[in-house]
Amino acid sequence: MRLLAILAGMGMAAAQAGNFLIVSFKGEEVPVALLKEIRPAGVILYPSNLRRDPQGVVARLRALDPNLLLLVDQEGGPFTSYREGVVRFPSAMALSASGDEGLVERVGWALGCQVRRLGADVNLAPVLDVNTNPDNPIIGLRSFGADPERVARMGLAFARGVLRSGAKPVGKHFPGHGDTGVDSHLDLPRVDKPKEALEGAELLPFRRYVAAGMPALMTAHILFPALDPKYPATLSAKILTGLLRKEMGFAGAILTDDMAMGAIKRHYGAGEAAVLAVKAGADLLLLEPDEAAIREVHARLSKALGQEIPLSWAEEARRRAQGLKAGQGECPFTPKEEEALALEAARRGVVHRFGPLPIPGQGTLVLGLRISDRYGVEPTLADLAPQYLPGSRGLILSEDPTPVEIQKALAEARKAERLVASTYRWLGGFKEGQRTLVKELLALGKPLYLVALGNPDDLRFLPGKPTGYLATHGYRAVQVRAALEALAGVYAPTGQWVFGGEP
């Protein structure tokens, strides 16, 4: 009888281990066998899942299990997973630069409505990280800025907007990813600040978010020795249970960041890390699209349930996951209204520093970088210049211009009366080809306007001061358009500097 009871308990544990898991998969073919075997709480959808037939993928998942929680990264700016056939909105930093919480709430509402139209439940936003480190390798323009109070206000406005749609927001990355110098996708960052300093910066937006009764938070794979000298936040009971649950009083769902990121994978085995995260207080673990890793985690959690982890915790995880299912909301936006809202946000997020505006298009050469990264190719400044800066000529260059490209650009620049050139830095350092190009353009002695399409502080990497400088906080098409319209005098840019360390 005891053996039968043990076997029954093991069977129950295996059946409930999936309650902790949010899994993912590659492409648009739903892994039916895996989902039936694991029975996860939910699925996170990435751009590769949502290319040709987004609604079809969601419909197949719903047909398999109508209780599945479906999550998507719809931050706006570079982290926009559902992007085919929908309006692409500016980044959080662009929204914050407007200084208008009402605008931020409307954009959060529209992005929540995109999540709902897809058929998903959860928007993995807003980012509540305070961008205190200008060289942060993964946050930057995803943040609402360098001021904790502003981040708190704007982050809450965005979250309120998501809730209006019926989707559920997830604040991230607790306790704060803004002062890191290492990308946690690659390795384990460490933030060596005393608790008092963390309270004044990193923790402030999260405390406000918790106090507002928001439904979910995502953890950061970061070591904070002042909070826990041994474990990163995702695996720390001191941080997730002690600080977040008990001290801050958070009653919502705790989701981990992707458990396959280097910060976890390189230092802990997938299965062991999953057990540590659940024991620390995490409810839902996000897993990469790797069937072997998913099965490893499921098997280790099945073994731990009823032993290291109480079985009742699996039921609590299921309850919290179901609490994130989309609720009643309203989504009144037409495509035209979304486009108008995105343009308004882009224009109001443009920062202008020195140099008279407008400039004439006639006689102007516009040099546009073709920004190529995995978050989506957009039209360059040169592509859109003839339409939004009439009379100008455009020349497209690669993101890190080669010597041959630079010489071609200089030959064209010598024929022009004035120059407009884009720069770009978000992930990684400032490209040497961009630095060389700007140096050579400055040497021509002609009026030169620079447009920063990523983090707004490119001037600190450049060898001289241009005639004028615009920062858009992103390279989405609508932001490129907004920059050109500012140059043409369609509107006067009023964006506020929120990055920190103003030039």
Image (cartoon, rainbow, N blue to C red):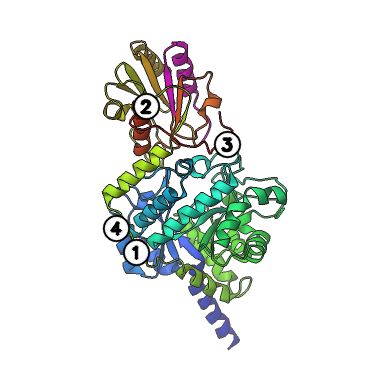
Q: Are marks 2 and 1 in contact (CB under 8 Å)?
A: no
Q: Secondary structure at mark 2?
A: helix
- Residue 430 within the magenta-colored segment of the rendering: yes
Q: Nearer the viewer, mark 2 or mark 4?
A: 2
Please determine whether, in this image, residue 2 is positioned above or below residue 447.
below
Image-quadrant location for residue 256 = bottom right
What crowding class fits label 2: few (fewer than 14 Cα within 10 Å), some (14-19), or many (20 or more)?
Answer: many
Residue 61 numbered mark, or none:
1
Task: Name the amino acid, label 3.
Answer: Gly
- Identify the mark nearer the N-term, 4 or 1: 4
How far is disc 3 from disc 2 in space, using C-alphas? 24 Å
Q: Nearer the viewer, mark 4 or mark 3?
A: 3
Q: Position of residue 310 (x, y in %)?
A: 60, 74
How far is disc 2 from disc 1 in space, using C-alphas? 47 Å
What crowding class fits label 1: few (fewer than 14 Cα within 10 Å), some (14-19), or many (20 or more)?
Answer: many
- Identify the mark nearer the N-term, 2 or 4: 4
- Residue 302 within the magenta-colored segment of the rendering: no
Q: Position of residue 421 (x, y in %)?
A: 40, 23
Task: Say whether residue 245 is left or right of residue 185.
Answer: right
The residue nearer to you, when weighing 244 against 407, is 244
Residue 55 numbered mark, or none:
4
Residue beneath label 2, please?
487
